[in-house]
Image (cartoon, rainbow, N blue to C red):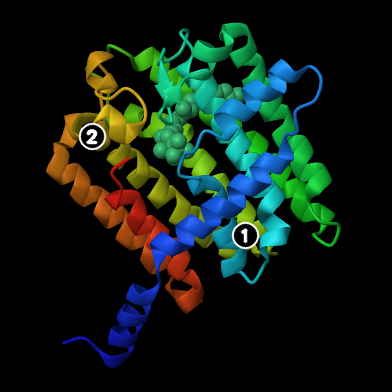
Amino acid sequence: MVATDDFQKTSEQSRFNLVTYLKERQKLCEAALDRAIPVVYPEKIYEAMRYSLLAGGKRLRPILCLATCEMLDGTIDMAIPTACALEMMHTMSLIHDDLPAMDNDDYRRGKLTNHKVFGEDIAILAGDGLLALAFEFVATQTPPYVSKDAVLQVIARMGKALGASGLVGGQVVDLESEGKLDTTLETLNFIHNHKTAALLEACVVCGGILAGAGEQEVGVLTRYSQNIGLAFQIIDDILDITATQEQLGKTAGKDLKAKKVTYPALWGIEESQSIAQQLVEEACTLLEPFREKAYPLQAIAHFIINRNH
Ligand code: GRG
């Protein structure tokens, strides 16, 4: 039997309209990103940076940052520069990941990859430009009423998530593991905790820090984001097998071709789905003390495992 409190919570939760929420937040992020990079001399580099940054995408990272800040009673104004910076970093990693020396892909976000349009030299520089701007943006655009200590912590976390202790480290082990079908679960977890989950964690935790989260709250946010990060990657691996190029906006079936070990290769598709579901349920439970303020982050966690691209 469902207790009255649980029933009320479930029905309120189901009235939270994630589709409308995501659309509004995507629009807000797109507009802020558009304003962040005006085209000036030398136009070519700004155009290349804007090409990938404004090419669409789910905008999950900036939305997670804003949603966490609001859950802890912060405002959008406090977090929007950091949210934009995190999307710049993510886009930078996609541009570099698509290069011939890395994953060598022709399509991303339904469009030709940056190097296919601007050439490899400019694509590398566009990534570098986005990465540098991300740090500058947080430092110069965060409103002055946000504590300088919070801004400093955000900048440190962004660097950590991106460097050798984050995305870069994960990418190195991923490159080394290509073609090795005996890659262990431990190595697979290392790759994705660093390549995928580290940046998602930075998005959530930085949103919290800007709102003044204390140590205990940062701990909860860290566990929530690590769970959704791993669930995100498990679903990404499944979609690489089951979705089409049109749905993904990039080449499908790449893991198999590159002989990469994936979660569905180790566990099968059904078991992988069930583990992702379990991770998301645990993540949502962690946020229950925030009651209705947690609905956006809980709904986003479910979206991560129910998406088709
Ligand atoms: C960070 C300095 C630095 C270098 C980059 C290339 C590289 C090192 C790391 C690769 C990181 C990478 C591409 C990880 C995959 C993450 C991932 C699952 C991307 C897809 O994210 P979605 O589905 O994409 O959110 P959209 O397009 O919706 O934003």
Mark 1 or mark 2: name the one nearer the start of the chain.
Answer: 1
Residue 27 visible here: yes
Q: Secondary structure at mark 2?
A: loop
Residue 126 point in image, percent of width and height: 65, 20
Mark-to-mark CA distance, 1 and 2: 34 Å
At 35% from the left and 38% from the top, the residue drawn is 233
Q: Are marks 1 and 2 in contact (CB under 8 Å)?
A: no
Q: Secondary structure at mark 1?
A: helix
Relative depth, front residue between 272 and 50: 50
Q: Which residue is mark 1?
A: 208
Q: Which residue is mark 2?
A: 243
Q: Is mark 1 within 8 Å of ligand 1?
A: no
At 28% from the left and 92% from the top, the residue drawn is 4
Residue 119 point in image, percent of width and height: 57, 8
Relative depth, front residue between 79 and 184: 79
> In the displayed structure, would residue 145 be above or below residue 15?
above
